[in-house]
Image: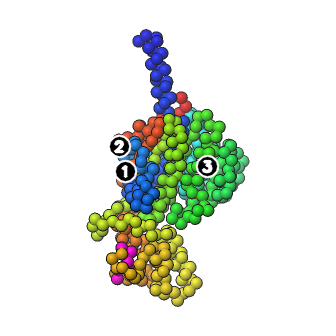
């Protein structure tokens, strides 16, 4: 090869490498979100006129195996470690090898240290919960929430958004206690904001921010009022802060953590609304991608399936009425609380007097057209009446609505179903075929380093 040809080749390789590595990288993880959760939300979204999910519209996709080092069914800690660090560990462990002898490096750390990128970690649940923690913590147990909080501060990442420290921010009896986590974060240079107004007012030139709305998870999407910050707002603010004065761009991991909680609760209506809220957050990133298509990568995935959700079940035949899930206006748990309050206020409350509340929050009809899918048939009426008498209306309403919709569940826990990974933008072509969850981290680590 002549010197000149070699120079051209070197230039081509340099350009190709430059083109291959995105400046802005988004990784979205739906906790407990596999194909059924994606598709239930997609069908519902289309039927209500919201259209297909953004996260299902990306051109590249990969079926993704989720097993951990010691189990076919992973927990979120082992899954987060795999997706973040590229190595399988045992269930319950975070950012350490299976034998716990060594700490693992996450793609967020690599993006920060080697890529010169600003890093943001966002979740709809608590910030020291397993999935976000997989990107900054190294602990033998996901339960060491205070120490995970210390790891968060030590990460020096620029932006954290979502729920707080799970009530563990001032765990004085921890052997490694150093002080209140919020105070320690402030001492380490973080601007700490704890409410929606301060979050929205956070200036773009804030060097490091800890934006934790409250001590616990964000409210469930189905229960939330518009005055509370949404996952999408945390992502929008993250983009604002992390793209400011960022010559090497950013890496942002966003978790839809409550999808998993609604899966454990076998609550289809709550579950699909969490997926929609998650998709709203993906949409914010997608809008950013449209402004920077050559320099942006978006990857969406799940960490495992939760609940063994099926769209259609024995007894439902081929009939599905997914739209009826829109009748549910709160979680079954908060409906249960409404019932308890009503009972406390009026111990003599009767089933007939409570019927309008069933109708308001679950759409059940007790009179009118018997062919209406929401009409409560005699055997269903008996079940509801019994639940009212036994004080378990939340559970009964959820089950009745889901049997009308045609949604089934086979577990209250995680399952071994693979998840789906989709990608768009610079480097997206790497995400195809049947892959391991660890492959996501390996590809990410290659993509987030500086050229
Ligand atoms: Zn779970």
Labelled pair 2, 3 in contact (Cβ < 8 Å)? no
Label 2: how many Cα within 10 Å (few below 14, some 14–19, many 20+) = some
Residue behind mark 3 = 237
Q: Main secondary structure of the magenta part?
A: loop
For residue 144, above or below residue 10: below
Label 1: how many Cα within 10 Å (few below 14, some 14–19, many 20+) = many
Residue at x 42% of width, y 53% of height: 52
Of 94 and 436, which appears nearest the observer? 436
Residue 118: percent from the left, percent from the top?
60, 40
Query: In which quarter of the view is residue 111 placed?
Result: top right
Residue at x 36% of width, y 79% of height: 369
> First in sequence: mark 2 or mark 1?
1
Any atom of ligand 1 within 8 Å of the CB at mark 3? no
Name the secondary structure under disc 1.
Answer: loop
> First in sequence: mark 3 or mark 1?
3
What is the span of residues highlighted in magenta in the rendered image? 373-378
For residue 46, above or below residue 429: below
Any atom of ligand 1 within 8 Å of the CB at mark 1? no
Instruction: Determine whether, in the image, residue 261 is placed left or right of residue 158.
Output: left
Instruction: Determine whether, in the image, residue 409 is placed left or right of residue 225.
Output: left
Residue 156: percent from the left, percent from the top?
63, 43
Labelled pair 2, 1 in contact (Cβ < 8 Å)? yes
Residue 371: percent from the left, percent from the top?
33, 76
């Amino acid at each position: 090869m002549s010197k000149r040809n070699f120079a051209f080749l070197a230039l081509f390789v340099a350009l190709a490498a430059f083109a291959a590595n995105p400046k802005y990288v988004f990784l979205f993880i739906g906790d407990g979100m596999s194909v059924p959760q994606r598709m239930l939300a997609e069908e519902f979204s289309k039927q209500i006129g919201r259209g297909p999910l953004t996260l299902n519209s990306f051109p590249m996709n990969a079926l993704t195996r989720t097993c951990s080092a010691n189990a076919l069914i992973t927990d979120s800690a082992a899954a987060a470690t795999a997706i973040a660090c590229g190595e399988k560990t045992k269930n319950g462990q975070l950012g350490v090898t299976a034998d716990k002898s060594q700490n693992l490096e996450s793609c967020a750390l690599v993006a920060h240290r080697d890529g010169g990128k600003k890093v943001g970690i966002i979740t709809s649940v608590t910030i020291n919960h397993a999935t976000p923690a997989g990107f900054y913590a190294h602990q033998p147990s996901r339960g060491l929430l205070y120490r995970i909080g210390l790891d968060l501060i030590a990460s020096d990442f620029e932006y954290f958004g979502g729920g707080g420290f799970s009530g563990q921010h001032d765990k004085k009896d921890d052997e490694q206690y150093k002080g209140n986590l919020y105070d320690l974060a402030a001492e380490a240079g973080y601007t700490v904001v704890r409410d929606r107004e301060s979050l929205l007012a956070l200036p773009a030139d804030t060097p490091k921010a800890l934006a934790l709305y409250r001590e616990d998870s964000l409210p469930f999407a189905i229960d939330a009022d518009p005055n509370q910050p949404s996952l999408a707002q945390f992502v929008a603010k993250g983009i604002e802060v992390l793209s400011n004065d960022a010559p090497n761009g950013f890496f942002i991991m966003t978790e839809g953590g409550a999808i998993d909680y609604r899966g454990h609760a076998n609550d289809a209506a709550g579950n699909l609304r969490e997926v929609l809220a998650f998709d709203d957050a993906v949409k914010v990133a997608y809008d950013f991608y449209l402004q920077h298509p050559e320099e942006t990568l978006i990857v969406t995935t799940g960490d495992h399936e939760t609940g063994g959700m099926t769209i259609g079940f024995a007894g439902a035949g081929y009939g599905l009425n997914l739209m009826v899930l829109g009748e549910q206006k709160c979680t079954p748990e908060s409906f249960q609380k409404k019932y308890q309050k009503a009972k406390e206020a009026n111990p003599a409350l009767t089933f007939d007097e409570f019927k309008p509340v069933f109708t308001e929050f679950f759409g059940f009809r007790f009179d009118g057209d018997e062919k209406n899918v929401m009409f409560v048939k005699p055997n269903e009426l008996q079940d509801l009446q019994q639940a009212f008498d036994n004080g378990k209306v939340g559970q009964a309403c959820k089950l009745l609505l889901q049997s009308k919709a045609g949604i089934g569940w086979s577990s209250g826990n995680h399952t071994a179903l693979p998840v789906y990974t989709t990608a768009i933008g610079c480097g997206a072509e790497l995400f195809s075929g049947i892959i391991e969850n660890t492959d996501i981290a390996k590809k990410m680590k290659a993509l987030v380093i500086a050229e």
